[in-house]
Amino acid sequence: MLDSLLEALNESPDNIPLKYQIAKLYFEKFQFIEAEKQLVEILALDSSHRNSKFLLAKTYFELTKFSTAEIIIEELL
């Protein structure tokens, strides 16, 4: 499934919903660095994408980047 989503992303690199689905899959597969890359790209396109911010905070937590995760959570509150 991930491979087909990545192929679709090549056709539409700024597709935020698609990038978010890919980031979620990476997160679920414990590929946190890859999830982080997708989420940072989403937020570069749309800095108000709350779901991406929340998932990025969770990703940073998993990467033991606790201070960065805390900053994002505080932004969401």
Image (tube, rainbow, N blue to C red):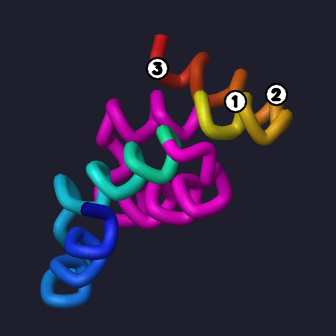
Kindly identify the residue that appears in the image at 15 percent across and 89 percent down: 11
Q: Front-most of 2 and 8?
A: 2
- Please name the residue that numbered disc 3 is placed on: 76
Callout 1: SS: helix
In percent of width and height, residue 38 lies at 45, 62
Q: Check if residue 60 falls in the magenta segment.
A: no
Q: Is residue 66 above or below residue 28?
A: above
Q: Front-most of 35 and 76?
A: 35
Q: Could you tell me how far apart the alpha carbons at marks 1 and 2 are, in whole angstroms?
A: 5 Å
How crowded pointer 2 is (Cα within 10 Å; few <14, some 14-19, many 20+) is rated as some
Magenta: predominant secondary structure element? helix
Q: Does 9 sit left or right of 53 as displayed?
A: left
Q: Does 7 sit left or right of 32 as displayed?
A: left
Callout 3: SS: helix
Q: Quadrant of residue 43 in the image?
A: bottom left
How crowded pointer 1 is (Cα within 10 Å; few <14, some 14-19, many 20+) is rated as many
- Please name the residue that numbered disc 1 is placed on: 69
Amino acid beneath label 3 = Leu
Callout 2: SS: helix
Q: Which residues are magenta?
A: 29-57
Kindly identify the residue that appears in the image at 17 percent across and 68 percent down: 15
Amino acid beneath label 2 = Phe
Q: Which comes sooner in the sequence, label 1 or label 3?
A: 1
How crowded pointer 3 is (Cα within 10 Å; few <14, some 14-19, many 20+) is rated as few
Kindly identify the residue that appears in the image at 60 percent across and 17 percent down: 74
